[in-house]
Amino acid sequence: MNEDLTFLVLRQLQANPKQTQLQLSQAIGISVGRTNYVVRALIERGLLKAEHFRNSKNKSAYAYLLTPEGIDTKARITARFIQRKRAEYDALRAELDQLTAEAEAEGLLPQ
């Protein structure tokens, strides 16, 4: 399981712990089966815990709660995610600047 997927799942479940695995899979863009695999792996690693809704008629309804270790892990992953995305942004920005300068030099864009 990659770190970005772990980040997305933890982020979604922290924001909405009562969402179903179907809702979670749709929110992060993966299959329900893969979502189930990831959620189970995070529970086994001690980052999540699943609790039945006490007053739910649907006995398969769960709330997925981040454990203290899950909160710490999410914080560390978030910092690395931001660093990666900033580096990607900086590289893309440099490429856009270069392409824009080339296009302007060739008269393809107004200066």
Image (tube, grey):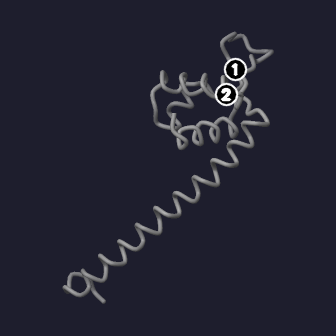
Residue shown at 63% from the left, 47% from the top: 77
The secondary structure type at the circle numbered 2 is loop
Disc 1: CA contacts within 10 A as few (<14), some (14-19) or many (>=20) = some
Residue 53 figure quarter: top right
Above or below residue 25? Residue 81 is below
Image quarter (top left, top right, bottom left or bottom right) of the C terminus:
bottom left
Of residues 109 and 49, which is closer to you in this image? 49
Tell me if 19 is positioned left or right of 38 in this view: right
The residue tagged 1 is: 62
The residue closer to the viewer here, 36 or 54, is 36
Residue at point 51%, 33% (across, down): 1
Please state the horizontal and vertical placement of residue 93, each as a whole percent of the image.
Answer: 42, 71
Among the 4 quarters of the image, the one containing residue 104: bottom left
Could you say which disc has been placed on residue 1 in the image? none
Closer to us: 12 or 110 = 12
Earlier sequence position, callout 1 versus callout 2? 2
Q: Specify the amino acid type for callout 1.
A: Tyr
Q: Secondary structure at mark 1?
A: strand
Disc number at residue 45? Answer: 2
Residue 29 horizontal side relative to residue 3, left or right:
left
Q: Residue at x 59, y 36 (%)?
A: 9
User: Seen from this angle, which residue lies furthest front?
Assistant: 45
Between the C-alphas of marks 1 and 2, the distance is 18 Å
Q: Position of residue 48 (x, y in %)?
A: 70, 29
On the image, the x and y values in percent for residue 41 come to 60, 25
Q: Residues within 10 Å of mark 2 (few under 14, many from 20)?
A: few
Type of residue at label 2?
Answer: Arg
Residues at marks 1 and 2 touching, judged by CB atoms closer than 8 Å: no
Depicted 79 relative to depicted 22: above or below: below
